Image (cartoon, grey):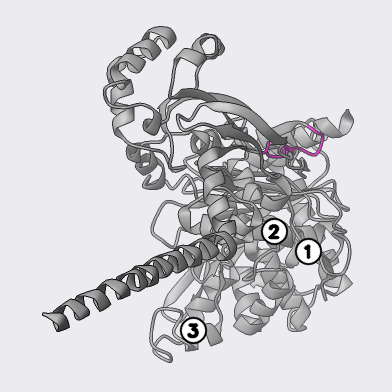
Amino acid sequence: MAVTSQQRQTGLRQQPLVLLVVVLLFCSAMVARLVWMQLLEGARFRELADENRIRLVPRSPIRGRLLDRKGRVLATSKLSYTLYVEPRLVSDSAWPGLRDRLAALLNLKPDVLDQRRDRGVDRDGYRTTLALNLKPEQVLRFREQASTLQGAQVDVEILRHYPHGTLASHALGYTQPITEQEYEALAEKGYKIRDRIGRTGVEAAYETHLRGKWGGQMLEVNAMGEVQRNLGDRPSVAGKDLTLTLDLDLQRAAELSLADKPGGAVVALDPEDGSILALASKPGFDPNFFSKLITTQKEYDALFSNPKKPLLSRAMNPYDPGSTWKPVTAMAGMESGKFPPDTKLHTTACITYGGHCFPDHNGVGFGTIGYVDALRFSSNTFFYQVGVGVGSLALKQAADQLGFQQKTGIEIGWEESVGLVGDERWAAKGRGWAAPGSVPWIPEDMASASIGQSVVQITPLQLARAYAVFANGGWLVTPHLAKGQTNWLDAEHRRRVEIKSSTLKTIREGLRKVVSAGTGFGLNGPGIPPAAGKTGTAEDSTGGPDHAWFGTYAPYPEGEIVVVAFAQNTPGGGSVHALPMAKTVLAAWEKTRQR
Protein backbone atom coordinates (compact mmCIF):
# COMPACT_ATOMS: atom_id res chain seq x y z
CA MET A 1 0.00 0.00 0.00
CA ALA A 2 2.82 2.43 0.78
CA VAL A 3 4.41 1.76 -2.60
CA THR A 4 1.16 2.29 -4.40
CA SER A 5 0.52 5.54 -2.54
CA GLN A 6 4.01 6.78 -3.36
CA GLN A 7 3.57 5.98 -7.06
CA ARG A 8 0.23 7.82 -7.06
CA GLN A 9 1.79 10.87 -5.47
CA THR A 10 4.64 10.83 -8.02
CA GLY A 11 2.15 10.61 -10.89
CA LEU A 12 0.20 13.53 -9.49
CA ARG A 13 3.34 15.59 -9.19
CA GLN A 14 4.20 14.86 -12.94
CA GLN A 15 0.73 15.67 -14.26
CA PRO A 16 1.15 19.48 -14.23
CA LEU A 17 4.40 19.05 -16.14
CA VAL A 18 2.68 17.01 -18.84
CA LEU A 19 -0.10 19.56 -19.10
CA LEU A 20 2.47 22.32 -19.35
CA VAL A 21 4.25 20.52 -22.17
CA VAL A 22 0.96 20.02 -24.02
CA VAL A 23 0.02 23.67 -23.57
CA LEU A 24 3.46 24.77 -24.75
CA LEU A 25 3.16 22.55 -27.80
CA PHE A 26 -0.24 24.00 -28.68
CA CYS A 27 1.00 27.54 -28.14
CA SER A 28 4.08 26.87 -30.25
CA ALA A 29 1.90 25.51 -33.02
CA MET A 30 -0.39 28.53 -32.82
CA VAL A 31 2.55 30.93 -32.84
CA ALA A 32 4.10 29.09 -35.75
CA ARG A 33 0.80 29.23 -37.60
CA LEU A 34 0.44 32.93 -36.92
CA VAL A 35 4.00 33.58 -38.05
CA TRP A 36 3.32 31.61 -41.23
CA MET A 37 0.07 33.45 -41.89
CA GLN A 38 1.27 36.93 -41.00
CA LEU A 39 4.85 36.94 -42.21
CA LEU A 40 5.23 34.29 -44.84
CA GLU A 41 1.72 34.31 -46.37
CA GLY A 42 0.52 37.68 -45.16
CA ALA A 43 0.56 39.35 -48.54
CA ARG A 44 -1.46 36.57 -50.13
CA PHE A 45 -4.10 36.54 -47.38
CA ARG A 46 -4.40 40.31 -47.53
CA GLU A 47 -4.99 39.99 -51.27
CA LEU A 48 -7.67 37.36 -50.69
CA ALA A 49 -9.34 39.51 -48.06
CA ASP A 50 -9.30 42.48 -50.41
CA GLU A 51 -10.83 40.36 -53.14
CA ASN A 52 -13.70 39.53 -50.79
CA ARG A 53 -14.06 43.15 -49.73
CA ILE A 54 -13.08 45.05 -52.88
CA ARG A 55 -14.62 44.66 -56.31
CA LEU A 56 -12.92 45.98 -59.43
CA VAL A 57 -15.43 47.05 -62.06
CA PRO A 58 -13.46 47.08 -65.33
CA ARG A 59 -14.01 49.74 -67.96
CA SER A 60 -13.23 48.68 -71.49
CA PRO A 61 -11.36 51.11 -73.73
CA ILE A 62 -12.92 52.64 -76.81
CA ARG A 63 -11.26 51.16 -79.88
CA GLY A 64 -9.68 53.60 -82.32
CA ARG A 65 -11.70 54.45 -85.42
CA LEU A 66 -10.84 53.38 -88.96
CA LEU A 67 -11.01 56.30 -91.39
CA ASP A 68 -10.72 56.48 -95.15
CA ARG A 69 -8.02 58.63 -96.76
CA LYS A 70 -10.30 61.69 -96.53
CA GLY A 71 -11.21 61.18 -92.88
CA ARG A 72 -14.59 59.53 -93.40
CA VAL A 73 -15.50 56.86 -90.82
CA LEU A 74 -15.27 53.22 -91.88
CA ALA A 75 -15.35 51.67 -88.40
CA THR A 76 -16.19 53.15 -85.02
CA SER A 77 -17.63 52.11 -81.65
CA LYS A 78 -21.11 52.36 -80.20
CA LEU A 79 -22.59 51.88 -76.73
CA SER A 80 -24.90 48.99 -75.94
CA TYR A 81 -26.69 48.57 -72.59
CA THR A 82 -27.07 45.08 -71.13
CA LEU A 83 -29.14 43.78 -68.20
CA TYR A 84 -27.34 41.32 -65.89
CA VAL A 85 -28.11 39.39 -62.72
CA GLU A 86 -25.50 38.24 -60.19
CA PRO A 87 -26.66 34.71 -59.16
CA ARG A 88 -24.77 34.74 -55.86
CA LEU A 89 -26.83 37.71 -54.71
CA VAL A 90 -30.19 36.29 -55.78
CA SER A 91 -31.40 33.03 -54.23
CA ASP A 92 -33.78 30.69 -56.01
CA SER A 93 -36.58 31.80 -53.71
CA ALA A 94 -35.89 35.51 -54.37
CA TRP A 95 -35.55 35.15 -58.14
CA PRO A 96 -39.28 34.97 -59.08
CA GLY A 97 -39.96 38.29 -57.37
CA LEU A 98 -36.98 39.99 -59.03
CA ARG A 99 -37.83 38.45 -62.39
CA ASP A 100 -41.41 39.70 -62.33
CA ARG A 101 -40.33 43.21 -61.33
CA LEU A 102 -37.76 43.36 -64.13
CA ALA A 103 -40.25 42.01 -66.65
CA ALA A 104 -42.87 44.61 -65.72
CA LEU A 105 -40.42 47.50 -65.44
CA LEU A 106 -38.55 46.84 -68.71
CA ASN A 107 -41.32 45.17 -70.73
CA LEU A 108 -39.51 41.83 -70.92
CA LYS A 109 -40.93 38.31 -71.06
CA PRO A 110 -40.59 36.40 -67.73
CA ASP A 111 -40.05 33.04 -69.46
CA VAL A 112 -37.18 34.48 -71.51
CA LEU A 113 -35.55 35.81 -68.33
CA ASP A 114 -35.90 32.35 -66.78
CA GLN A 115 -34.26 30.70 -69.78
CA ARG A 116 -31.33 33.09 -69.75
CA ARG A 117 -30.77 32.75 -66.01
CA ASP A 118 -30.76 28.97 -66.38
CA ARG A 119 -27.80 29.19 -68.80
CA GLY A 120 -25.51 30.06 -65.89
CA VAL A 121 -22.83 32.70 -65.54
CA ASP A 122 -21.08 34.42 -68.43
CA ARG A 123 -17.37 34.10 -69.23
CA ASP A 124 -16.49 36.67 -66.58
CA GLY A 125 -17.60 34.11 -63.98
CA TYR A 126 -19.87 36.19 -61.76
CA ARG A 127 -22.92 37.41 -63.67
CA THR A 128 -25.50 36.27 -66.21
CA THR A 129 -26.78 38.20 -69.21
CA LEU A 130 -30.55 38.66 -69.15
CA ALA A 131 -31.23 41.19 -71.92
CA LEU A 132 -29.22 42.93 -74.64
CA ASN A 133 -29.47 46.28 -76.41
CA LEU A 134 -31.74 47.98 -73.89
CA LYS A 135 -33.38 51.15 -75.12
CA PRO A 136 -32.58 54.47 -73.40
CA GLU A 137 -36.00 54.58 -71.74
CA GLN A 138 -35.48 51.06 -70.34
CA VAL A 139 -32.11 52.08 -68.91
CA LEU A 140 -33.68 55.16 -67.33
CA ARG A 141 -36.50 53.13 -65.73
CA PHE A 142 -34.02 50.63 -64.31
CA ARG A 143 -31.78 53.28 -62.82
CA GLU A 144 -34.72 54.96 -61.15
CA GLN A 145 -35.48 51.68 -59.32
CA ALA A 146 -31.94 50.23 -59.14
CA SER A 147 -31.65 50.48 -55.33
CA THR A 148 -34.62 48.13 -54.90
CA LEU A 149 -33.54 45.60 -57.55
CA GLN A 150 -31.00 43.70 -55.47
CA GLY A 151 -28.71 41.51 -57.62
CA ALA A 152 -29.60 43.08 -60.97
CA GLN A 153 -27.52 45.65 -62.83
CA VAL A 154 -27.35 47.44 -66.15
CA ASP A 155 -23.90 47.82 -67.65
CA VAL A 156 -22.66 49.47 -70.81
CA GLU A 157 -20.74 47.54 -73.48
CA ILE A 158 -18.61 49.22 -76.13
CA LEU A 159 -19.12 47.36 -79.42
CA ARG A 160 -17.41 47.71 -82.79
CA HIS A 161 -19.67 49.28 -85.40
CA TYR A 162 -19.26 49.41 -89.17
CA PRO A 163 -21.62 52.10 -90.48
CA HIS A 164 -21.34 50.95 -94.11
CA GLY A 165 -22.15 47.30 -93.40
CA THR A 166 -20.50 44.95 -95.89
CA LEU A 167 -18.45 47.70 -97.55
CA ALA A 168 -14.72 46.83 -97.60
CA SER A 169 -15.36 44.02 -95.12
CA HIS A 170 -12.40 41.90 -96.25
CA ALA A 171 -10.02 44.83 -95.95
CA LEU A 172 -11.34 46.11 -92.60
CA GLY A 173 -11.81 42.69 -91.01
CA TYR A 174 -13.67 42.29 -87.72
CA THR A 175 -13.22 41.89 -83.96
CA GLN A 176 -14.25 38.93 -81.81
CA PRO A 177 -14.22 38.04 -78.11
CA ILE A 178 -10.83 36.81 -76.97
CA THR A 179 -10.56 33.04 -76.50
CA GLU A 180 -9.37 31.45 -73.26
CA GLN A 181 -6.12 30.38 -74.93
CA GLU A 182 -5.52 33.90 -76.21
CA TYR A 183 -6.32 35.34 -72.81
CA GLU A 184 -3.72 33.11 -71.14
CA ALA A 185 -1.12 34.35 -73.62
CA LEU A 186 -2.14 38.02 -73.64
CA ALA A 187 -3.19 38.67 -70.02
CA GLU A 188 0.25 40.03 -69.19
CA LYS A 189 -0.22 42.60 -71.97
CA GLY A 190 -3.32 44.01 -70.29
CA TYR A 191 -6.03 41.96 -72.01
CA LYS A 192 -9.14 40.95 -70.03
CA ILE A 193 -11.35 37.90 -70.38
CA ARG A 194 -14.10 40.23 -71.61
CA ASP A 195 -11.81 41.75 -74.24
CA ARG A 196 -12.41 41.77 -77.97
CA ILE A 197 -9.51 41.35 -80.35
CA GLY A 198 -8.97 42.12 -84.03
CA ARG A 199 -9.47 38.82 -85.82
CA THR A 200 -8.90 39.58 -89.52
CA GLY A 201 -8.07 42.44 -91.86
CA VAL A 202 -6.84 45.82 -90.67
CA GLU A 203 -8.50 45.20 -87.31
CA ALA A 204 -6.01 42.39 -86.68
CA ALA A 205 -2.97 43.90 -88.42
CA TYR A 206 -3.16 47.09 -86.34
CA GLU A 207 -4.55 45.60 -83.11
CA THR A 208 -1.99 47.24 -80.82
CA HIS A 209 -2.57 50.64 -82.42
CA LEU A 210 -6.36 50.45 -82.19
CA ARG A 211 -7.16 48.69 -78.90
CA GLY A 212 -6.33 51.20 -76.11
CA LYS A 213 -5.98 50.30 -72.40
CA TRP A 214 -8.51 49.10 -69.83
CA GLY A 215 -9.48 51.23 -66.86
CA GLY A 216 -11.66 50.45 -63.88
CA GLN A 217 -13.48 51.55 -60.73
CA MET A 218 -12.51 50.04 -57.35
CA LEU A 219 -15.51 49.61 -55.04
CA GLU A 220 -15.69 48.47 -51.40
CA VAL A 221 -18.59 46.10 -50.75
CA ASN A 222 -20.00 44.41 -47.67
CA ALA A 223 -20.82 40.74 -47.17
CA MET A 224 -24.13 41.24 -49.01
CA GLY A 225 -22.34 42.66 -52.03
CA GLU A 226 -23.66 46.15 -51.38
CA VAL A 227 -21.40 49.03 -52.41
CA GLN A 228 -20.08 50.94 -49.41
CA ARG A 229 -17.78 53.46 -51.07
CA ASN A 230 -15.71 54.24 -54.14
CA LEU A 231 -12.02 53.60 -53.45
CA GLY A 232 -10.67 54.98 -56.71
CA ASP A 233 -11.19 55.38 -60.41
CA ARG A 234 -8.79 54.85 -63.30
CA PRO A 235 -10.18 55.94 -66.67
CA SER A 236 -9.63 53.72 -69.68
CA VAL A 237 -7.37 54.98 -72.47
CA ALA A 238 -8.95 55.09 -75.91
CA GLY A 239 -7.19 53.45 -78.84
CA LYS A 240 -5.72 55.55 -81.63
CA ASP A 241 -7.58 56.30 -84.84
CA LEU A 242 -6.09 54.81 -88.02
CA THR A 243 -6.32 56.53 -91.39
CA LEU A 244 -6.43 54.08 -94.26
CA THR A 245 -5.46 54.53 -97.90
CA LEU A 246 -8.94 53.41 -99.00
CA ASP A 247 -11.14 55.96 -100.74
CA LEU A 248 -14.79 55.55 -99.75
CA ASP A 249 -16.04 56.76 -103.16
CA LEU A 250 -13.86 54.32 -105.08
CA GLN A 251 -14.71 51.50 -102.69
CA ARG A 252 -18.42 52.10 -103.28
CA ALA A 253 -17.86 52.15 -107.03
CA ALA A 254 -15.85 48.91 -106.88
CA GLU A 255 -18.52 47.11 -104.91
CA LEU A 256 -21.26 48.49 -107.15
CA SER A 257 -19.45 47.06 -110.17
CA LEU A 258 -19.60 43.60 -108.57
CA ALA A 259 -23.31 43.78 -107.76
CA ASP A 260 -24.52 41.68 -110.71
CA LYS A 261 -21.63 39.19 -110.64
CA PRO A 262 -21.75 35.79 -108.90
CA GLY A 263 -18.34 36.51 -107.40
CA GLY A 264 -15.15 38.41 -108.01
CA ALA A 265 -12.87 41.18 -106.89
CA VAL A 266 -11.73 44.70 -107.68
CA VAL A 267 -8.37 46.17 -106.70
CA ALA A 268 -7.44 49.82 -107.24
CA LEU A 269 -4.07 51.15 -106.16
CA ASP A 270 -1.69 54.05 -106.61
CA PRO A 271 1.21 52.72 -108.72
CA GLU A 272 3.62 55.28 -107.30
CA ASP A 273 3.66 54.03 -103.70
CA GLY A 274 1.27 51.05 -103.55
CA SER A 275 -1.54 52.77 -101.62
CA ILE A 276 -4.68 50.65 -102.00
CA LEU A 277 -7.58 52.88 -103.00
CA ALA A 278 -10.20 50.13 -103.16
CA LEU A 279 -10.21 46.45 -102.24
CA ALA A 280 -13.53 44.74 -102.92
CA SER A 281 -14.52 41.09 -102.90
CA LYS A 282 -17.81 39.33 -103.57
CA PRO A 283 -19.49 37.61 -101.85
CA GLY A 284 -18.83 39.63 -98.73
CA PHE A 285 -20.06 39.67 -95.15
CA ASP A 286 -21.23 42.19 -92.59
CA PRO A 287 -18.54 42.63 -89.90
CA ASN A 288 -21.27 43.90 -87.55
CA PHE A 289 -22.26 40.23 -87.24
CA PHE A 290 -19.22 39.69 -85.04
CA SER A 291 -20.10 42.61 -82.77
CA LYS A 292 -23.24 40.89 -81.50
CA LEU A 293 -23.00 39.96 -77.83
CA ILE A 294 -24.84 36.69 -78.36
CA THR A 295 -24.68 34.63 -81.56
CA THR A 296 -26.26 31.23 -82.06
CA GLN A 297 -24.43 28.24 -83.51
CA LYS A 298 -26.92 28.22 -86.37
CA GLU A 299 -25.94 31.78 -87.28
CA TYR A 300 -22.25 30.89 -87.13
CA ASP A 301 -22.77 27.84 -89.33
CA ALA A 302 -24.70 29.90 -91.88
CA LEU A 303 -21.64 32.12 -92.29
CA PHE A 304 -18.65 29.82 -91.79
CA SER A 305 -20.12 26.80 -93.57
CA ASN A 306 -21.58 28.78 -96.46
CA PRO A 307 -20.54 27.06 -99.73
CA LYS A 308 -20.07 30.51 -101.34
CA LYS A 309 -17.30 31.24 -98.80
CA PRO A 310 -18.15 34.89 -98.06
CA LEU A 311 -15.20 35.19 -95.67
CA LEU A 312 -12.71 34.41 -98.46
CA SER A 313 -11.14 37.48 -100.06
CA ARG A 314 -11.20 36.89 -103.82
CA ALA A 315 -8.75 39.78 -104.18
CA MET A 316 -6.06 37.67 -102.50
CA ASN A 317 -7.06 34.23 -103.77
CA PRO A 318 -5.45 32.77 -106.93
CA TYR A 319 -7.20 32.10 -110.24
CA ASP A 320 -6.22 31.42 -113.86
CA PRO A 321 -5.45 34.89 -115.28
CA GLY A 322 -5.92 34.17 -118.98
CA SER A 323 -4.72 36.82 -121.40
CA THR A 324 -3.96 39.41 -118.70
CA TRP A 325 -0.82 37.26 -118.27
CA LYS A 326 0.46 37.92 -121.82
CA PRO A 327 2.49 41.03 -120.85
CA VAL A 328 4.51 38.73 -118.56
CA THR A 329 5.22 36.37 -121.46
CA ALA A 330 6.13 39.38 -123.59
CA MET A 331 8.58 40.53 -120.93
CA ALA A 332 10.16 37.06 -120.78
CA GLY A 333 10.57 36.97 -124.57
CA MET A 334 12.23 40.38 -124.81
CA GLU A 335 14.36 40.13 -121.65
CA SER A 336 15.72 36.72 -122.73
CA GLY A 337 16.98 38.23 -125.98
CA LYS A 338 15.37 35.44 -128.02
CA PHE A 339 12.40 37.55 -129.09
CA PRO A 340 13.49 41.23 -129.11
CA PRO A 341 11.02 44.12 -129.31
CA ASP A 342 11.00 44.21 -133.11
CA THR A 343 10.09 40.50 -133.40
CA LYS A 344 7.44 39.58 -135.97
CA LEU A 345 5.74 36.19 -135.82
CA HIS A 346 3.22 34.49 -138.05
CA THR A 347 -0.03 33.69 -136.25
CA THR A 348 -2.41 30.99 -137.40
CA ALA A 349 -5.57 29.08 -136.49
CA CYS A 350 -3.71 26.78 -134.09
CA ILE A 351 -0.27 25.42 -133.27
CA THR A 352 0.35 21.84 -132.20
CA TYR A 353 2.33 21.09 -129.05
CA GLY A 354 2.55 17.48 -127.91
CA GLY A 355 -0.71 15.87 -128.93
CA HIS A 356 -2.88 18.98 -128.86
CA CYS A 357 -3.45 21.82 -131.32
CA PHE A 358 -3.64 25.05 -129.33
CA PRO A 359 -5.97 27.52 -131.11
CA ASP A 360 -6.10 31.25 -131.53
CA HIS A 361 -9.29 32.69 -130.11
CA ASN A 362 -10.59 33.96 -133.49
CA GLY A 363 -10.07 30.58 -135.18
CA VAL A 364 -7.87 31.90 -138.03
CA GLY A 365 -4.99 33.90 -136.51
CA PHE A 366 -3.96 37.49 -137.23
CA GLY A 367 -1.25 37.12 -139.85
CA THR A 368 2.30 38.26 -139.21
CA ILE A 369 2.36 40.67 -136.26
CA GLY A 370 4.64 42.07 -133.55
CA TYR A 371 4.22 42.51 -129.81
CA VAL A 372 2.03 45.62 -129.93
CA ASP A 373 -0.56 44.09 -132.22
CA ALA A 374 -0.30 40.73 -130.46
CA LEU A 375 -1.39 42.45 -127.27
CA ARG A 376 -3.95 44.56 -129.13
CA PHE A 377 -5.65 41.50 -130.67
CA SER A 378 -4.71 39.21 -127.75
CA SER A 379 -3.27 36.63 -130.15
CA ASN A 380 -2.77 33.26 -128.49
CA THR A 381 -0.59 31.73 -131.20
CA PHE A 382 1.86 34.65 -131.03
CA PHE A 383 2.41 34.14 -127.32
CA TYR A 384 2.54 30.34 -127.60
CA GLN A 385 5.58 30.77 -129.84
CA VAL A 386 7.24 33.25 -127.50
CA GLY A 387 6.56 31.22 -124.34
CA VAL A 388 7.60 27.86 -125.76
CA GLY A 389 10.61 29.52 -127.37
CA VAL A 390 12.02 31.01 -124.14
CA GLY A 391 11.05 28.11 -121.87
CA SER A 392 9.57 27.85 -118.41
CA LEU A 393 12.54 29.18 -116.46
CA ALA A 394 12.65 32.46 -118.38
CA LEU A 395 8.92 32.90 -117.90
CA LYS A 396 9.29 32.15 -114.20
CA GLN A 397 12.10 34.70 -113.93
CA ALA A 398 9.96 37.45 -115.46
CA ALA A 399 7.08 36.49 -113.18
CA ASP A 400 9.33 36.67 -110.13
CA GLN A 401 10.53 40.14 -111.10
CA LEU A 402 6.92 41.31 -111.32
CA GLY A 403 6.10 39.93 -107.87
CA PHE A 404 4.22 36.73 -108.72
CA GLN A 405 4.38 33.52 -106.65
CA GLN A 406 5.28 35.59 -103.59
CA LYS A 407 3.36 37.63 -101.07
CA THR A 408 2.85 41.26 -101.95
CA GLY A 409 3.77 42.63 -98.52
CA ILE A 410 0.29 43.89 -97.70
CA GLU A 411 -0.32 44.17 -93.93
CA ILE A 412 -3.01 41.47 -94.01
CA GLY A 413 -0.69 39.03 -95.77
CA TRP A 414 -1.65 36.02 -93.63
CA GLU A 415 -4.89 35.98 -95.65
CA GLU A 416 -3.02 36.08 -98.97
CA SER A 417 -2.08 33.19 -101.26
CA VAL A 418 1.21 33.23 -103.17
CA GLY A 419 -0.44 31.58 -106.16
CA LEU A 420 1.42 29.41 -108.67
CA VAL A 421 3.72 29.90 -111.63
CA GLY A 422 4.60 26.39 -112.73
CA ASP A 423 7.93 25.53 -114.35
CA GLU A 424 9.98 22.46 -115.19
CA ARG A 425 11.67 22.35 -111.75
CA TRP A 426 8.30 22.46 -110.03
CA ALA A 427 7.04 19.65 -112.26
CA ALA A 428 10.17 17.54 -111.61
CA LYS A 429 9.44 17.72 -107.86
CA GLY A 430 5.95 16.27 -108.39
CA ARG A 431 3.83 19.40 -108.88
CA GLY A 432 2.91 19.37 -105.21
CA TRP A 433 0.80 16.22 -105.46
CA ALA A 434 2.77 13.43 -107.22
CA ALA A 435 6.02 11.58 -106.70
CA PRO A 436 9.15 13.38 -107.93
CA GLY A 437 9.92 12.59 -111.56
CA SER A 438 6.50 11.05 -112.27
CA VAL A 439 4.87 14.11 -113.90
CA PRO A 440 7.56 15.91 -115.97
CA TRP A 441 7.09 19.26 -117.69
CA ILE A 442 5.70 18.84 -121.21
CA PRO A 443 5.22 21.19 -124.20
CA GLU A 444 1.50 21.41 -123.47
CA ASP A 445 2.33 22.88 -120.06
CA MET A 446 4.49 25.56 -121.62
CA ALA A 447 1.84 26.51 -124.16
CA SER A 448 -0.76 26.85 -121.39
CA ALA A 449 1.60 28.86 -119.20
CA SER A 450 2.27 31.29 -122.05
CA ILE A 451 -1.33 32.51 -122.00
CA GLY A 452 -2.01 32.24 -118.27
CA GLN A 453 -3.80 28.92 -118.14
CA SER A 454 -3.65 25.70 -116.13
CA VAL A 455 -0.21 25.94 -114.51
CA VAL A 456 -0.47 29.67 -113.74
CA GLN A 457 -2.67 30.94 -110.90
CA ILE A 458 -2.43 34.51 -109.61
CA THR A 459 -4.40 36.84 -107.36
CA PRO A 460 -6.04 40.09 -108.49
CA LEU A 461 -3.82 41.95 -106.02
CA GLN A 462 -0.68 40.42 -107.55
CA LEU A 463 -1.82 41.41 -111.03
CA ALA A 464 -2.46 44.99 -109.89
CA ARG A 465 1.03 45.12 -108.40
CA ALA A 466 2.55 43.83 -111.67
CA TYR A 467 0.64 46.31 -113.83
CA ALA A 468 1.84 49.06 -111.49
CA VAL A 469 5.37 48.26 -112.76
CA PHE A 470 4.24 49.14 -116.30
CA ALA A 471 2.38 52.21 -115.07
CA ASN A 472 5.18 53.74 -112.97
CA GLY A 473 8.08 53.02 -115.28
CA GLY A 474 9.63 49.95 -113.68
CA TRP A 475 9.15 49.97 -109.88
CA LEU A 476 7.74 47.07 -107.87
CA VAL A 477 5.76 48.63 -105.01
CA THR A 478 4.35 47.23 -101.78
CA PRO A 479 0.54 47.38 -101.60
CA HIS A 480 -0.66 48.71 -98.25
CA LEU A 481 -3.87 49.75 -96.53
CA ALA A 482 -2.78 52.24 -93.86
CA LYS A 483 -1.18 55.63 -93.92
CA GLY A 484 1.33 56.48 -91.23
CA GLN A 485 4.98 57.06 -90.58
CA THR A 486 6.21 54.41 -93.04
CA ASN A 487 8.00 55.74 -96.11
CA TRP A 488 6.58 53.50 -98.82
CA LEU A 489 9.00 54.94 -101.37
CA ASP A 490 12.16 53.74 -99.65
CA ALA A 491 14.19 50.76 -100.86
CA GLU A 492 12.60 48.38 -98.36
CA HIS A 493 9.14 48.83 -99.87
CA ARG A 494 9.86 49.84 -103.48
CA ARG A 495 12.52 48.30 -105.68
CA ARG A 496 13.65 48.79 -109.23
CA VAL A 497 12.72 45.98 -111.61
CA GLU A 498 15.53 44.89 -113.91
CA ILE A 499 13.71 45.47 -117.17
CA LYS A 500 15.11 47.01 -120.33
CA SER A 501 13.67 50.37 -121.33
CA SER A 502 12.86 48.92 -124.77
CA THR A 503 10.91 46.07 -123.14
CA LEU A 504 8.95 48.44 -120.94
CA LYS A 505 8.26 50.80 -123.86
CA THR A 506 6.97 47.97 -126.06
CA ILE A 507 4.66 46.55 -123.40
CA ARG A 508 3.26 49.98 -122.58
CA GLU A 509 2.59 50.71 -126.25
CA GLY A 510 0.86 47.36 -126.61
CA LEU A 511 -1.35 47.93 -123.56
CA ARG A 512 -2.26 51.36 -124.85
CA LYS A 513 -3.18 49.90 -128.25
CA VAL A 514 -5.50 47.41 -126.51
CA VAL A 515 -7.62 50.33 -125.27
CA SER A 516 -7.27 52.71 -128.19
CA ALA A 517 -8.04 50.19 -130.95
CA GLY A 518 -8.21 46.66 -129.56
CA THR A 519 -10.13 44.32 -127.29
CA GLY A 520 -10.30 47.00 -124.59
CA PHE A 521 -11.80 49.71 -126.80
CA GLY A 522 -14.99 49.72 -124.71
CA LEU A 523 -13.12 51.45 -121.91
CA ASN A 524 -13.14 54.74 -123.80
CA GLY A 525 -15.89 57.21 -123.11
CA PRO A 526 -16.83 60.48 -121.40
CA GLY A 527 -15.22 60.90 -118.01
CA ILE A 528 -12.53 58.28 -118.66
CA PRO A 529 -8.90 59.44 -118.98
CA PRO A 530 -6.60 57.95 -121.65
CA ALA A 531 -5.75 54.46 -120.42
CA ALA A 532 -3.79 51.29 -121.15
CA GLY A 533 -4.90 47.80 -120.26
CA LYS A 534 -5.47 44.16 -121.11
CA THR A 535 -8.55 42.00 -121.28
CA GLY A 536 -8.57 38.37 -120.25
CA THR A 537 -10.89 35.39 -120.52
CA ALA A 538 -9.67 32.39 -118.56
CA GLU A 539 -10.83 28.82 -118.38
CA ASP A 540 -11.41 27.81 -114.77
CA SER A 541 -8.94 24.97 -114.14
CA THR A 542 -11.20 23.70 -111.34
CA GLY A 543 -13.94 22.98 -113.89
CA GLY A 544 -16.28 25.95 -113.46
CA PRO A 545 -17.40 28.53 -116.04
CA ASP A 546 -14.85 30.97 -117.46
CA HIS A 547 -13.43 33.89 -115.51
CA ALA A 548 -13.40 37.45 -116.87
CA TRP A 549 -10.46 39.80 -116.22
CA PHE A 550 -9.39 43.32 -117.07
CA GLY A 551 -6.29 45.14 -115.87
CA THR A 552 -5.78 48.82 -116.63
CA TYR A 553 -3.91 51.95 -115.61
CA ALA A 554 -4.57 55.62 -116.30
CA PRO A 555 -3.83 58.21 -117.42
CA TYR A 556 -1.48 56.99 -120.12
CA PRO A 557 1.55 56.98 -120.24
CA GLU A 558 2.39 57.79 -116.60
CA GLY A 559 -0.36 56.07 -114.65
CA GLU A 560 -1.73 57.43 -111.39
CA ILE A 561 -4.14 54.57 -110.74
CA VAL A 562 -4.15 50.85 -111.51
CA VAL A 563 -7.44 48.94 -111.55
CA VAL A 564 -7.83 45.18 -111.82
CA ALA A 565 -11.35 43.81 -112.19
CA PHE A 566 -12.08 40.10 -111.86
CA ALA A 567 -15.47 38.46 -112.40
CA GLN A 568 -15.37 34.90 -111.11
CA ASN A 569 -17.11 32.20 -113.21
CA THR A 570 -18.75 34.83 -115.40
CA PRO A 571 -18.48 33.51 -119.00
CA GLY A 572 -18.63 35.92 -121.90
CA GLY A 573 -15.20 37.53 -121.93
CA GLY A 574 -13.14 40.13 -120.12
CA SER A 575 -14.22 42.92 -122.44
CA VAL A 576 -17.89 42.14 -121.78
CA HIS A 577 -17.87 41.70 -117.99
CA ALA A 578 -14.64 42.84 -116.32
CA LEU A 579 -13.93 45.91 -118.45
CA PRO A 580 -17.18 47.69 -117.45
CA MET A 581 -16.31 47.01 -113.81
CA ALA A 582 -12.96 48.77 -114.16
CA LYS A 583 -14.64 51.55 -116.13
CA THR A 584 -17.00 52.23 -113.22
CA VAL A 585 -14.05 52.64 -110.87
CA LEU A 586 -12.06 54.82 -113.28
CA ALA A 587 -15.07 57.08 -113.76
CA ALA A 588 -15.42 57.50 -109.99
CA TRP A 589 -11.68 58.21 -109.70
CA GLU A 590 -11.75 60.82 -112.45
CA LYS A 591 -14.73 62.49 -110.79
CA THR A 592 -12.91 62.73 -107.45
CA ARG A 593 -9.85 64.14 -109.24
CA GLN A 594 -11.90 66.99 -110.67
CA ARG A 595 -13.20 68.12 -107.26
State which quadrant residue 480 falls in.
bottom right
Q: Nearer the viewer, residue 232 or 154?
A: 232
Q: Position of residue 310 (x, y in %)?
A: 47, 44
State which quadrant residue 536 falls in.
bottom right
Q: Main secondary structure of the magenta part?
A: loop
Using the image, determine if residue 512 lies above or below residue 436: above
Of tags 1 and 2, which is closer to the observer? 2
User: Which residue is found at the position 39% from the left and 89% from the top?
Assistant: 438
Secondary structure category for the residue under label 2? loop
Q: Which of disc 2 and disc 1 is earlier in sequence?
A: 2
Q: Is residue 297 magenta?
A: no
Residue corresponding to mark 1: 507
User: Which residue is found at the position 38% from the left and 33% from the top?
Assistant: 88
Q: Which of disc 1 and disc 3 is earlier in sequence?
A: 3
Report, in whole angstroms, how far the alpha carbon at label 3 lies from the one at label 1.
29 Å
| Chain part drawn in magenta | 61-71
Q: Which of disc 2 and disc 3 is earlier in sequence?
A: 2
Q: Position of residue 457 (x, y in %)?
A: 54, 65
Q: Dot 2 surroundings within 10 Å: few (below 14), some, or many (20 or more)?
A: some
Q: Nearer the viewer, residue 511 or 439?
A: 439
Query: Label 2 amino acid?
Result: Ile
Residue corresponding to mark 3: 427
Of tags 3 and 2, which is closer to the observer? 2
Q: Are marks 1 and 2 in contact (CB under 8 Å)?
A: no
Quarter of the image with the N terminus in it = bottom left
Report, in whole angstroms, how far the alpha carbon at label 1 lies from the one at label 2.
26 Å
Query: Label 3 amino acid?
Result: Ala
